Amino acid sequence: MNKRSLVVRGRSWETGMYEYRPGGRGVRAAVIRGLCRIFVLPTLRWWPLRGPLARLMPLVDVVFRPVPRLAGTEYEPVRGAGWRGELVRPCDAATGGGAILYLHGGAFLFCGLASHRRIVERLALRTGLPVLSVAYRHLPKQRLDVSIADATDAFGWLVARGVPAESIVCIGDSAGGHLAFALAFHAARTGAGRPAGVVAMSPWLDFDNAAKSAHDNARRDVFIPATRLDRVAALLTGSEHSAAIDPLRSPVNLDPGVLPPVLIQCAEDEVLRCDAELMADRLSAAGIENTLQIWQGQVHAFPVLADLLPESRAALDDIAAFTTRVLPTPPAKCA
């Protein structure tokens, strides 16, 4: 475990922690990697981003609807200004303590409430907190600005329900990790209040994909085809090509000094490790508390696979511990 430190105003501030998590060489992790290499990687590489087939991508979420819900949780359907959601509570919900805002991944192209219901349930059960899972609008029908607006509106929905901004932890995986950071930046700019913390699993934070494409992980990643990132980024931002994208559309290029404590998790061999490391470095340079966890032998956004992998469950334990630590009032379970 290596510590990153920064001298600020003549004092030494320990602002960042790098944690390397070995393991992930078991049979289950190997099977997951193999299945991703055989099925997920080529599908994401060749699936059209426009046209009739692109309009089928939201159906991915439908596949997960039959998955049974975990015992000990209850649900409240939510509708916002253009977005849908589910407020998931443990049956023995904590009193006070705050809430979690969860933003699902899926490359801004697919997934939703059903695909990420299990990780949301597990977070609720581990923390004792209510979790608002947001089905924000995204490609192919809507661009990045709409996705960010939906995330921001969901944050405001929690505040309007009586949860202080500083008692909300924003959590997201992949595209949702981007939105978690974008939301925190937006809240700081508009005076909506700083959330208690940000957790990002394998976040996509930089639309300049040159460094990622040149990295060895562009060949090692068994999940994300690095060759598609530029095209998706251009579609997201309405640009003709990725080189024309305003750098300020990428969270890594915004002022990290306004952010709360941050936990970032990523896989050792995934292409988005570049973004995770860059954001962690910039957070440390700005004096913001952050932890970057690099997990060996895992795939992109692996904590979502907690039903299958012990490493994923361990990662969720770390997220739960971080969440309860950064809240101004730790949750207290009902008797």
Image (cartoon, rainbow, N blue to C red):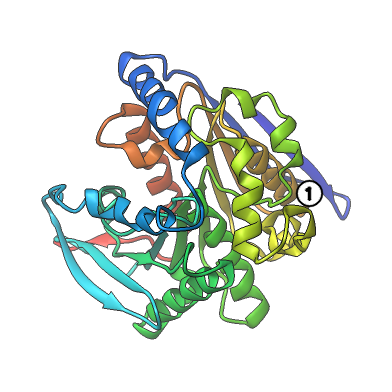
Image point (50%, 75%), residue name: 152
* Residue 81 appears left or right of 203: left
Q: Quadrant of the N terminus?
A: top right
Q: How many marks?
A: 1
* Closer to the camera in the image, 122 or 151: 151
Q: Residue at x 25, y 36 (%)?
A: 307
Q: Position of residue 164 (x, y in %)?
A: 44, 77
Q: Which residue is mark 1?
A: 285
Image location of residue 308, percent across then percent down: 27, 31
* Residue 143 x/y as whole percent: 55, 68
Density class for disc 1 (Cα within 10 Å; few <14, some 14-19, many ≥20) is: some
Q: Name above or below for residue 24 compared with residue 39.
A: above
Q: Nearer the viewer, residue 125 or 181?
A: 181
> 141 or 217: which is nearer to us?
141
Residue in view at x 88 percent, y 51 percent:
10
> Is residue 276 found left or right of 77 in the rendered image?
right
Residues 241 and 117: in front is 241
Amino acid type shown at disc 1:
Ala
Q: Secondary structure at mark 1?
A: helix
Where does the image place residue 274, in percent across and percent down from the top left? 67, 37
Report the side of 247 relative to 60 (left or right).
Answer: right
Question: Residue lying farthest right?
Answer: 10
Where is 56 relative to 271, above or below?
Answer: below
Q: Is residue 120 visible?
A: no
Q: Residue at x 32, y 61 (%)?
A: 331
Which quadrant is home to the C terminus?
A: bottom left
Tell me if residue 221 can be seen.
yes
